[in-house]
Amino acid sequence: MLTKTFSFLWAGLILGLTSMAVVASTKDQATELPKNCQYLKEVATNQTHIRKQIDAIGKNNFNTDFAVPSGVKFASFKGVMVPENDGKYGVTINLKYPDNSVNSAFQKNVEMKRGETYSLPFQSPTGRQPYQINFNINGMNNNAYTIAVMACRLFGNQKVPDPGVIGWKIQVLFP
């Protein structure tokens, strides 16, 4: 498998995140569930993988909310998105907190290819535990995609990465 990697590092530019990456890969690579992670459930359907079709003209159904279970401290999250159409998708990830405050964890227009799986790792910019994660995804009318969110706990001596350096990395894997 050939790997083509583009990396750009910025110091302290994007919303106070510890790292930011969009990684395109085969479905199996991006959706493997580590032992310390679990998929979050969407609030309306109680499902973990949600397929949506963009309706930019009518319903404007850009938002998808995932519930974060209480009583578990998650250190990081990863959105997993598989578009059904080539195109540019506007992806915003908002974290909602019990005090009704909201922080953006990711906001970027990402050029995506049909059928590739994109990983969007993120953390709470405040370090606080959200109760809900909102994905706002827009793009061309009728484009469709499937979205899921992994939430991961720290084990043992693992440490949360230093928030001082922010990176944007795009990795495309070719079979």
Image (cartoon, rainbow, N blue to C red):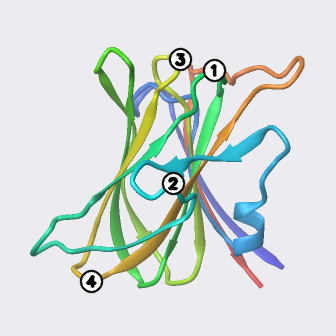
Judge depth for marks 1 and 4 and give the one in front.
1
SS category of the residue bearing label 4: loop
Foreground residue, 73 or 107? 73
Q: Which residue lies at the image location 83% right of the left edge and 22% below the top edge?
A: 158
- The amino acid marked with disc number 3 is Gly
Pointer 2: what residue? 46
Q: Is residue 142 left or right of residue 117?
A: left
Q: In terms of image quadrants, where is residue 94?
A: top left
Query: Label 3 vs label 2: CA separation?
Result: 26 Å
Q: Amino acid at mark 2?
A: Asn
Indicate the amino acid at tag 1. Answer: Gly
> Closest to the observer: 154 or 7?
154
Mark seen at residue 142? 4
Cα separation between marks 1 and 2: 18 Å
Q: Residues within 10 Å of mark 4 (few under 14, many from 20)?
A: few
Question: Quick check: 132 left or right of 136?
Answer: right
Which residue is under mark 3? Answer: 127
Earlier along the polypeptide chain: callout 1 or callout 2? 2
Identify the amino acid type marked 4.
Answer: Asn
Which residue: 70% across, 45% down? 38
Name the N-terminal-most of marks 1 and 4: 1
Label 1 Cα crowd, 10 Å radius (few <14 / some 14-19 / many 20+): few
* Residue situated in front as seen by the camera: 100 or 19: 100
Residue 74 lies left or right of residue 168; in this view the side is right
